[in-house]
C-alpha cells in the first residue's frame, strides 16, 4: 500500500530556532499534501494544503510566514516552523494524496517541543 | 474547522466486548472515513463508506451511515487490547486531493 514517510519523528529545540519537517510519498506521486496540527487529546486541525509547484493554501488563523510550506516535487513537501516558540509545540502530521488515490495516507507525525 | 462531534469522548471496555463509537457531521458529504490513531503516531485508515451506502464491513469493523441524521457509527466487535487507540471520523475527502475534516475523536481503552 501507499506509504508516507515523515521526518523527523521528534524534535526538541530552543526557542527561536527554525525547524524543518519533511513529508515524503515513497511509492506514489502526491499532487497534494496536507499539513495538520494536533494538540494533546484533541483532533487534527488542517493548517494548509500544499499542491506541487504552487503556493500553499493556508487555513484561516494560520500564519503563512510562521509556517513555511514548500512542495517542490511530487514526492516531497516540507513544513518549516520559523523562529519557533513554546506555543508552537505540538504534533504535526502530513498526509498525501492525488486525484485518484483515495484514501489519503498519513505520515507518522512529528512531535515538536520548543523549550 | 471541525465537522462535528463524536461520542463518547472516551470509552473503556473489557477485552472481548464490543465497542461502538458515533460521529455526527454538519454538511452534506460524498463519503465518510474512519481512522485510528495509536498514541503519538499517525493515522491509519480503517474504512471508507460512501454517501449511497448504509453499512460496510471490514473484518471486525462495522460502519453504518445515516445521511438523513448526518451520523455514522463504528462498531468494533470482540475487541482486543491492541484496539486501544483514538478513533476519528473524517469527512470532506471527495478525492485524494481534498482536505479532510476530522471529528473530535473517541479514545478507546480495551482492558485485558
Image (cartoon, rainbow, N blue to C red):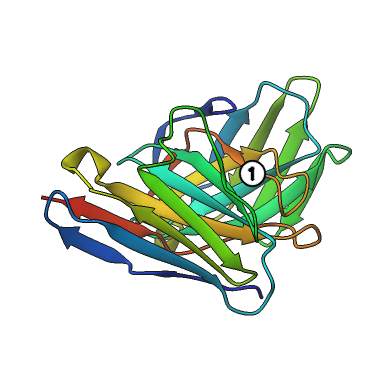
Q: In this orientation, which residue lies closer to the viewer: B76 or A17? A: A17
Q: Is residue B36 visible?
A: yes
Picture coordinates of residue B35, whole percent (x, y): 57, 51
Indicate the position of residue A83 as horizontal and vertical percent values. 23, 48
Residue closest to the eye, B43 or B24: B43
Label 1 resides on the chain identified as: B
Work out whether A89 lies above or below B73. Answer: below
Say whether residue B104 is left or right of residue B32.
left
User: Of all residues shown, which one is farthest toward the right?
Assistant: B52
Do we see residue B108 in this rendering?
no
Q: Say which residue appears at 24% left-offset and 46% top-offset.
A: A89
Q: Examine the image and state in which quarter residue B101 appears.
A: top right
Vertical placement of residue B71 versus A69, above or below: above
Q: Secondary structure at mark 1?
A: loop
- Please name whichever residue, A41 or A21, is drawn nearer the observer in this view of the structure: A21
Provide the residue designation for mark 1. Answer: B99
Residue found at x 37% / y 56%: A80
Q: Nearer the viewer, residue A111 or B4?
A: A111
**Few, some or many residues within 10 Å of mark 1 (<14, 14–19, 20+):** many
- The quarter in which the N terminus of chain A is drawn is bottom right
For the point 43% across and 67% down, the residue is A22
Amino acid at each position: 500500500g501507499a506509504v508516507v514517510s515523515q521526518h523527523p519523528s521528534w524534535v526538541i529545540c530552543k526557542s527561536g530556532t527554525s525547524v524543518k519537517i519533511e513529508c515524503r510519498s515513497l511509492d506514489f506521486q502526491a499532487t497534494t499534501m496536507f499539513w495538520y496540527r494536533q494538540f494533546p487529546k484533541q483532533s487534527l486541525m488542517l493548517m494548509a494544503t500544499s499542491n506541487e509547484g504552487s503556493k500553499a493554501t493556508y487555513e484561516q488563523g494560520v500564519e503563512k510566514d510562521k509556517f513555511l510550506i514548500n512542495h517542490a516535487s511530487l514526492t516531497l513537501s516540507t513544513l518549516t516552523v520559523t523562529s519557533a516558540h513554546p506555543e508552537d509545540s505540538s504534533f504535526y502530521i502530513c498526509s498525501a494524496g492525488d486525484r485518484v488515490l483515495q484514501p489519503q495516507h498519513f505520515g507518522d507525525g512529528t512531535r515538536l517541543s520548543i523549550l | 474547522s471541525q465537522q462535528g462531534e463524536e461520542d463518547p469522548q472516551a470509552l473503556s471496555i473489557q477485552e472481548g466486548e464490543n465497542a461502538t463509537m458515533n460521529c455526527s457531521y454538519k454538511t452534506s458529504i460524498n463519503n465518510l472515513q474512519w481512522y485510528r490513531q495509536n498514541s503519538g503516531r499517525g493515522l491509519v485508515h480503517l474504512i471508507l463508506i460512501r454517501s449511497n451506502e448504509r453499512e460496510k464491513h471490514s473484518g471486525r469493523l462495522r460502519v453504518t451511515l445515516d445521511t438523513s441524521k448526518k451520523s455514522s457509527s463504528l462498531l468494533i466487535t470482540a475487541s482486543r487490547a491492541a484496539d486501544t487507540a483514538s478513533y476519528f471520523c473524517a469527512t470532506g475527502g471527495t478525492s485524494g486531493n481534498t482536505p479532510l475534516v476530522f471529528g473530535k475523536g473517541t479514545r478507546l481503552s480495551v482492558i485485558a
